[in-house]
Image (cartoon, helix red, strand yellow):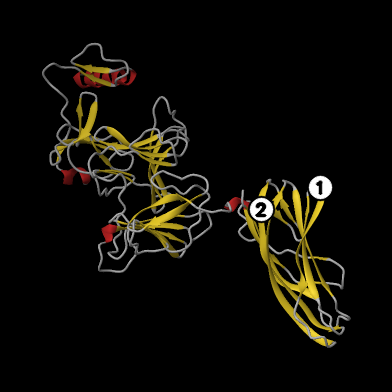
Amino acid sequence: MRKIFLVIVSCLITAALQAQSVGIGTATPDASALLHLESTSKGLLLPVMSTTNRTGIAAPAQGLMLYDFNTKSIWMKGATDWQEMITTSNNNWFENGGNLYRSAGFVGIGTANPYNKLQIHNNLNDSNFLRLTNNTSGNGPADGLLIGARGAGAALLNLENGSFYLGTNNDSTVTLSANGRVGIGTATPGGVLQVSSRVTGTVPSVLIVDSNTNNGGSLKLRTLGNTTGMLITEYSGGSNFNADQFLDIKSDTAYVATFRGNGRMGINNLNPLYVLDVGGDVNTTGRLLLSGNAGTAGQVLTSNGASDPSWQTQQDLYPGAFRAMIPFTTTGISSAIPTTVLLGTAHYNLNTTAIAVTATGVTINTTGLYQIEGKVTFNTGTVTVAAGGNPYGTLDVEIDNGVTNRTYNQINGRIDQLSVTAGSIAFRQTHPFKFLVHITAGSVLSFTANIFQYASAAGTPQVSGGYVSINRVE
């Protein structure tokens, strides 16, 4: 009878356990717990075993828990393997207030073998970035700051429309502005690159050092698409002289200027012997000044020997601005017919508005007394003359002021002394001429020539050459 009672009680307990929670140490077990343990002096003791025993359990069920006395930690069987329950004794991560830190070892993200305190590895493609964002930049794929590797290169990229700063000692030394300008020593660069030195003394703002002992640091300027350009280098020669004494400028393949440490500058001359030593012609479109003095109109630069040169007034009876020397060109002359003498290119005509020259005349644009002088050569060629004939030539100067036309006969004489015997003979004679005449502004001077007294023109009668000089006297 007693055994039957125990069986009935056991069945009732089993039914009760299947229908509700069981409490040990509490009369009101939590409805969500199958077994509710409660005590202020005792705990739950899990099976205690070694690591060998734990790993030797055959077909452990998921959720199976035990204490491993080798690792001194609680273990639970997961879906595939055993998982250690982290405790204070085996945890490498620690909390300090709201901070989480690791006191020893390396941390790897994407790698089980980190080589540094923190290594982030991406085995899926050739880019690996760390992104930093804030409440201003946003949190999208095109926001924030990227730091990472791209292929064999590295990137530090600000994705925002703002400046990038690089500095030290709590100071932004280098600034890359949003408009693509770089400032060193300034946060507001005014050009593509601006260097603003913050140092004092002899420290240079920019120092370029070349590793080649036969060359100085170089700076090259060229346009896009060209390989040549302007090269500025501190040293361009061979060995055996002080490289710190030179700054050379090279254009394409030739050095065009040098600045030496002794204060001398050479242009097209790399070994200047003077403060300025130019190897070639010098042209200027501006003034020539001596100690800031350009002199006065009409003065010339005069050497004073060992002393400095100076501006001097040139003593000239005929002002340079009102004089010209004009050559005659060859022209044929018909018998007894005046022929206009052709004029060549004027020389020493320092003011072409005062004396203007064309092929057939000279225009005088300033009223004054002029001296007109020169030489003319007549050449008759071989001509036939009558008995006792004496060919002669004339040169007339005509001055036409638009109202009157005056003629000044300069030469009217025999070209050469002839015998009284008729025959064919060549004649050539050069005659000088010189006279003073007052000319009003706007007058045009022209020159005509004749050869007379010959019977035939077997030769070529002509003015074979000459010149006329026009000078204003007063």
234 to the left or right of 50: right
The residue closer to the viewer here, 148 or 168, is 168
x, y percent for residue 433: 69, 65
x, y percent for residue 227: 49, 61
Q: Label 1 to label 2, Cα distance in Å?
A: 18 Å
- The quadrant where residue 406 appears: bottom right
- The quadrant where residue 183 appears: top left
Q: Find disc 2 in the rendering and name its residue.
A: 370
Answer whether residue 52 is visible to the viewer in this image: yes
The amino acid type found where label 1 is placed reads: Gly
* Residue at 46% over, 39% down: 180
x, y percent for residue 4: 24, 20
The residue closer to the viewer here, 12 or 212, is 212
460 to the left or right of 67: right
For marks 1 and 2, the one nearer the N-term is 2
The residue closer to the viewer here, 21 or 431, is 431
The residue closer to the viewer here, 203 or 256, is 256
Q: Find disc 1 in the rendering and name its residue.
A: 402
* Residue at 85% over, 87% down: 422
* Residue at 24% over, 24% down: 98
